Amino acid sequence: MGYEALPRVMLANLPTPLEEAKNLRKVIGGPRLFIKRDDLNGLGLGGNKLRKLEFLMGEALGQGADTVVTSGAMQTNHGRLTAAAAARLGLDCILVMTEKDCGYYEGNRILQELFGARQVFAQVDYGVPPENLDKEKLRAGDVKIAEVIRELKAAGKKPYLIPRGGRSLQGTAAYCAAMAELKEQLDRLGVEPDHILVPVATGSTLTGVMLGAGVCGLKALIHGVALSRSPEEGKQMVAEEFNKDAAAMGYSCRIRPEEVIIYGDYIGEGYGIMTKAGQKAIRLLAETEGILLDPVYTSKAMSAYLDFVSKGFFKENETVVFFHTGGLPLLFLREVSAWLGEMAGMKEKREND
């Protein structure tokens, strides 16, 4: 069958640019670095989830859905882009938030409201042990999703459930297509990459990148940077999804968890919490290339790249492709404002001393 056979609706501005970070290389040395700008794919301020939604919304429309339902944290990029895609296609959108209502609007939550999504909140038990809280949020989200779906069907609606983060056959297919797009760009430039670096949360993007690389014949070593779960859990998830989706699309390739490369050294204190190295990456890319990274995903993945260069893991005669997966509304959160305000205050103090 192949990924091309799946239903699809065009939502993104494709192909996304492939830009060489020459100024950054002058500052830090290391290999040639090309940044695949999936943050610039258009609708809803863009991001990797938009590629996945082309396939997911294609299936939803094919099934006659009039409402899409999905879930995530308060600042979910996936929720923001689902809301934007639903608005474009004339569908209703319900977002199940797996956190309590913070009472204010910033970042993605502003955009979700503007796109007309209805945001409902799961009943999370915050009394569970801290190590169990993430699982409790997922459990509460599943309970609320089931309730929402029942209510919609009782009202005569036709809901379509989109998995968290777009992790699905369609999500994998989307990044198979992205890799074919990347291969064409690289071929035109006469470039053969040695490494590809991918931020990893649900693992759906990494799954598609790995499968797509095999399908289109890209030989680069693919590296994932863990942002929300342990590398061990991520490797297992990616291998399972890869093998299931490859079989469903008619591809013969299979992988084992130990063949998946994911680094867990760059998460910091946890998912969604900025790191000093990530902050450094944000400033460095902005000041050298005019490229914005987000505080949750791409800044931590780029901090891994900077670390690899400093340690000589990536060689000067090599070429690396970095997938910029978007998330730019997360720059407009209170935490980022507080960090920049603190940095400005420290700079002013140094200048006055």
Image (tube, grey):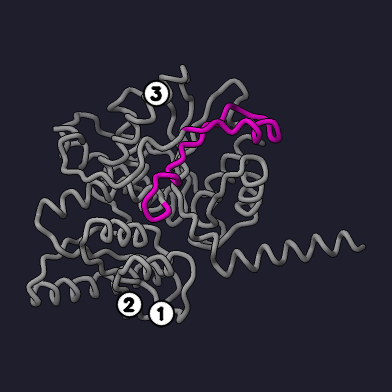
Q: How far across and down, in percent of the image, does residue 142 sit?
A: 25, 69
**The N terminus, quarter of image:** top left
Contact? badges 2 and 1 (CB < 8 Å): yes
Amino acid marked by disc 3? Lys
Neighbour class for label 3 at 10 Å: few (<14), some, many (≥20)? few
Which residues fall within the magenta stretch? 18-45
Q: How far across and down, in percent of the image, does residue 296 sit?
A: 51, 57
**The C terminus, quarter of image:** bottom right
Q: Identify the residue under disc 1.
A: 101
Which residue is at the front of the view, 29 or 124? 29
Labelled disc at residue 303: none
Amino acid marked by disc 1? Asp
Q: Identify the residue under disc 2.
A: 121
Image quadrant in which you'd find residue 331: bottom right
Image quadrant in which you'd find residue 83: bottom left
Q: How far across and down, in percent of the image, does residue 233 sit?
A: 37, 52
Of the residues under marks 2 and 3, which one precedes in the sequence? 2
Residue visible at 28% across and 41% down in the picture: 174
Q: Identify the residue under disc 3.
A: 219
**Vertical side of 306 occupied by 155: above or below:** below
Contact? badges 2 and 3 (CB < 8 Å): no
